[in-house]
Amino acid sequence: MKHRVDITPDKSLIRKTGLAGYSTAEAIAELVDNSIDARVGRVEVSVHLDFVEGSITVTDDGHGMDVDGLRRAMTVARGSKPDGTLGRFGMGMKSSCSALGGRFRLRTSPPGSGREYGLTYDEEEWLADGSARWDNYPISEDAAGDWHGTSIRIDRLKVPLYPNQSTNLRRGFGRRYASYIRDGEAAIRVNKKICEPPEEDVEEGSRIDVELRMRDGSSVRGHVGLLRSRSVGGDYGMDLYKNGRLIRQHVKFGFVAHPENARITGRLEMDDIPVNFQKNGFITESAQYREALREFAGSGPARRIQEMSRSGVHDAPSMEPVFGSLVSGSDPPKISRTMGADAARAVMEDAAPFTVDAGGRSIRVSMRSGGPGPLYDIRDGEGSREVVINRDSAWFSFVRNPLFLVGMIAAEVSAMPPGPEFAAFLRSRNEAVERIMGGQAAGPGRAGRGRARVPDAPGYGLAAELVGLHDHLVEESAPRFQFTAMSTLVPYLHNAKGTVVYTVHTVPGSGEDVAGMLSDAAGGGITVMDRPDRGALRSLLGGHGARRVIAVREFRSIRGPTVAGPYKAVVDMLAESKRRGVPVGIDEVGGIIRRMIRDGILDGARLAARARSAKRSALLEEALV
């Protein structure tokens, strides 16, 4: 037997959508988004705050709407806009107007129609009038005169208007819509004064372009750079955009908040990353966001700009001038004795092929990933020579600045004439050096750069705020470590209390070293504790407010990558949940497990086998009761 029931939304739905947590600027920005989406060529948008009458009006000269378009605009959650537009959820106009005031009047006219269509939403009347229904909302039609576009006036305001508000809106909209303003696609005014995009106070020569490819074929593009001076108020980091519209500003994306990073600035276009319907944040738990974060944090530009920010140096020479000066006999550029690991790796990964002239003979130089093996290879041709440098060679792990090796290669290449003698010399020299270096790889107690950071499990990865800390340990060649338990599981924790205890495992005798490295990099945002006992955790977490804690624990052996896979992390979390003072109990771990099984990240049978081998079967059964 089946029943059919009426599930028409309650009439209070529009009012309730206005309770979504918009700020005044965000709510007005929703209406500006719609105006930009409605542009016909270039759009003029006017925002007027009337401090006398207590109203807010947003007007544009876009393509307007006919009756059917107005009906769609008033239909809750009717998201009919295509990809690439700013407003796609079908919630923006209703929710933002309701957040701002108790009544709004909308007038709109399509170009060349000669007609103007309008409607009025009065919250009090709509809720009180029993005859007003979703299926009979009144829309007026009148002669339009010579205009087209849309105008929305909101009054009976629920938000305050204050004297400096128009100035703040102009500044915020200038940054938020900088792409559209600079490209001439939009002109936005607040109380008749134009919104200007901010001038970037970026150090000349510090800009590095970014282009990242995601697994699904989408991309993240943008750039990083250095501010001329360090920000002391936190106004640094990445500005994250979607479809040309600023979503989040000054995000510490892929690095930790720290004075050494306080010159980093940049912009990333993240058009394929989902945002919440208020468009004031990306959905950070989404697989797309986590992948973009991982890819950016591990990219050459991100590592290079962090090294530049820490060292204050951005003009380290590249391979080409070093190589070219040595083969031509000119004065070589000045090379520092050491180069940070981030900068060194960026120099090698970002090196493009180049050609230099050596006394009438051209030498083409390229760098490739060739795995373990000789430092470089030479291929001689008629009047030319090709040098292929192996960036994976163990040679690079024995020098503090890779440009010294580049210089050595240049000196050898320019000194030795083509022929079998040079080839024989290279083979003999390389074999001898490889024998010496063969036993010098990172020992079992070191993290090692070759270990995978993130297990190959789509939708699973390290918590965003830990990515920079993880990479700091790798770059500092920390003792062997592994982020596990809540370090990767926090996205699956519902109803988080704002307090999280992350876990890092390391080998015996190394807890203090690893904790010290993490503390140095974490700044004041995260508390790091070396092998905390129950009393220490209880004492720290017993106060008011959210806490972020990393608990470093020592284990006899650490296997696998520097970030635990999902099965290992869950089994470790089962043990963590039984420690007193840890804010996540065994029942909450059960909820995490169920969500991960539902999302296809865990297989129940495989998890049971893993728990059995770790002698955690009883805890797993308790969690899933």
Image (tube, helix red, strand yellow):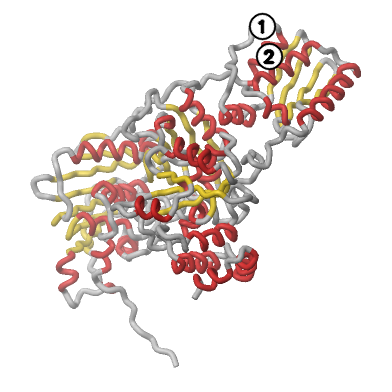
- The answer to whether residue 534 is left or right of residue 333 is left
Image quarter (top left, top right, bottom left or bottom right) of the N terminus: bottom left
Disc 2 residue crowd, few under 14, some 14–19, many 20+, Cα 10 Å: many
Picture coordinates of residue 337, whole percent (x, y) = 59, 17
- The answer to whether residue 29 is left or right of residue 516 is left
Q: Dividing the picture into quarters, in which one does residue 195 lie? A: top left
Residue 93, disc: none
Among the two numbered marks 1 and 2 on one chain, the one whose residue lies closer to the N terminus? 2
Picture coordinates of residue 540, whole percent (x, y) = 35, 50
Secondary-structure class at tag 1: loop
Label 1 belongs to which residue?
330
Looking at the rendered structure, the kind of residue marked 1 is Ser
Res 29 visible: yes
Examine the rendered structure and indicate whether residue 611 appears above or below residue 44: below
Res 243 visible: no
Q: Nearer the viewer, residue 140 or 102?
A: 102
Disc 1 residue crowd, few under 14, some 14–19, many 20+, Cα 10 Å: few
Question: Which residue corresponds to the image point at 40% horizontal and 49% vertical from the top-left?
Answer: 548
Examine the rendered structure and indicate whether residue 523 appears above or below residue 500: above
Q: Nearer the viewer, residue 150 or 479?
A: 479
Disc 1 and disc 2 in contact, CB within 8 angstroms: yes
Looking at the rendered structure, the kind of residue marked 2 is Gly
Label 2 belongs to which residue?
324
Examine the rendered structure and indicate whether residue 466 appears above or below residue 74: above
